[in-house]
Image (spheres, rainbow, N blue to C red):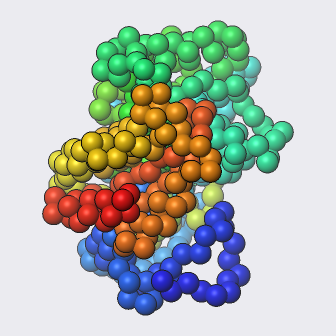
Amino acid sequence: MAVRQKSHLFYQSHNRRPVLDQARGIYMWDVDGERYLDGSSGAMVCNIGHSNENVLQAMRRQMEKSTFGYRLHFETEPAELLASKVAALSPEGLDKVFFVSGGSEAVESAIKLARQYALASDQPKRWKVISRYPSYHGCTLGALALTGFTSLSKPFDPMMRVMPKIPAPTAYLDGLDPDIPETGYHYADMLEQCILEEGPESVLAFIVEPVGGASTGALVPPAGYMERIREICTRYNILLIHDEVMTGGGRTGRFFAGEHWGVSPDILVLSKGFSAGYVPLGAMIAHNDIVDAVMAGGGFLHGFTYAGNPLACAAGLAVIEQIEAQDLLKNAETVGAILKHRLTGLMARYPFIGDVRGIGLLLAFELVSDRNTMQPLPKELSAFDRLVDIAYSNGLIIYSRRTRGGLEGDHFLVCPPMITTAEQVEEIMIMLIRSLD
Ligand code: PMP
């Protein structure tokens, strides 16, 4: 494993990783020529695989024309084309697109748009945003204030903590049947309770990851949950924000995960799979009424320098074209079902796998000390880093998190690119079994 001896970079993790040389399709190579199967698509980013020639060509074409045009100085064709494409893919009524360069920026933009909307619609007392624990919405201070992930937020307290949070619908930990709507209503009604306790006239918005990502490990909401959440937000005139930073762009088998339940938010945010790792890009898409009110009230007081630059938008457009041309939503659905079936099969072999969950190619498994009680592994036995390191040494990249439903727990996301084939699922399984053994 080629690891640089001395580095001036510093990130979250102390673990040294191999030095990346090249990446093609679902594989990556380090500078020593070791090959890795990208079983987590970066951090659920590189959805269409690495170095897609059509995307590279589109980027080259755009680079030769112009790489940057400041959005307040120039309209650009790629930004216009991408915005209309995204609007066409978004739920009805959500036609206004605001580009950013990443997920935290998209969430930050959604909070600021919602706050300005409250003023523009003469509801200045509405400012609180409710979110869930655990959840991940980003690392900028606004997005972090909504993030229910104490180990990440605590060092920065006190901050503009927006609200006490409600639990994510962890039916698998609470012994509830996720397939009956009563379970979904049970968790969704906690939102209503929270709104009533806080005072509905002070609550501005509720933000939710339709399928939990890094925080809950591919947690799919129980039947009835998303629909009931929508009803409650509408009843109390509270804006519903879908954080589709990880789910948007097709990983769950639909371009937006909200489509699985036929619910539309008032604002939605996406990034990661939107540009699939080719460039930093994200977007906030908002309902026309919200944007019209804010623009009529003097304009949106917000924006990032690099947002909507033509190179990023040309890449984003080419990524969506590839998703459509290769029918990758369908592939995420069918290959995801095969991979989920194979992961579920591991439970017979390994008693310490407590749960396998997810949808499309957003899949995870969780390690526990006892499957009956779902007690997490004790800290000293935590496999959080160890399994990832072992998988690396077997040529497989997976993504781990030690958090779940307010408890500590080890879950691992297995989320290869949406171009993965059924044969490559078998390759993943061989490396995964070798690592778990
Ligand atoms: N929201 C969700 C659901 C995410 O998964 C992430 C990134 N993991 C973010 C927001 C923040 O995105 P970024 O790291 O691009 O700022």
Residue at x 38%, y 88% (from the top left corner): 33
Residue at the bottom extreme, as displayed:
32
**The image quarter in which residue 161 lies:** top right
**Can residue 294 be seen here?**
no
Residue 340 at x, y percent in the picture: 26, 45
Q: Where is residue 335 shown, x and y percent of the image? A: 20, 52
Q: Residue at x 47, y 31 (%)?
A: 374
Q: Name the one closer to the observer, 10 or 194.
A: 10
Residue drawn at the location 43% of the way across and 13% of the way down: 185
Taking 231 as reference, is 7 above or below it?
Answer: below
User: Compared with residue 47, is residue 187 higher up or lower down, i.e. above or below?
Assistant: above
* Left or right of 180 in this view: 163: right
Residue 28 visible in the displayed image? yes
Rendered view: 23 above or below 406: below
The spot of residue 139 in percent (x, y) is 65, 51
In the image, taking residue 218 as reference, residue 151 lies left or right, namely right
Where's residue 225, x and y in %? 41, 21
Front position in the image: 17 or 164: 17
Q: Is 60 left, or right, of 236 in this rendering?
A: left
Asked if residue 229 is positioned above or below residue 323 in the image, the reply reads above
Please tell me which residue lies in front, 377 or 223.
377
- Left of 312 or right of it: where is 258? left
Quadrant location of the C terminus?
bottom left
Tell me where residue 70 sits by quadrant: bottom right
| Residue plotted at (69% across, 21% down) | 126
Exactly how many numbered labels are in the figure?
A: 0
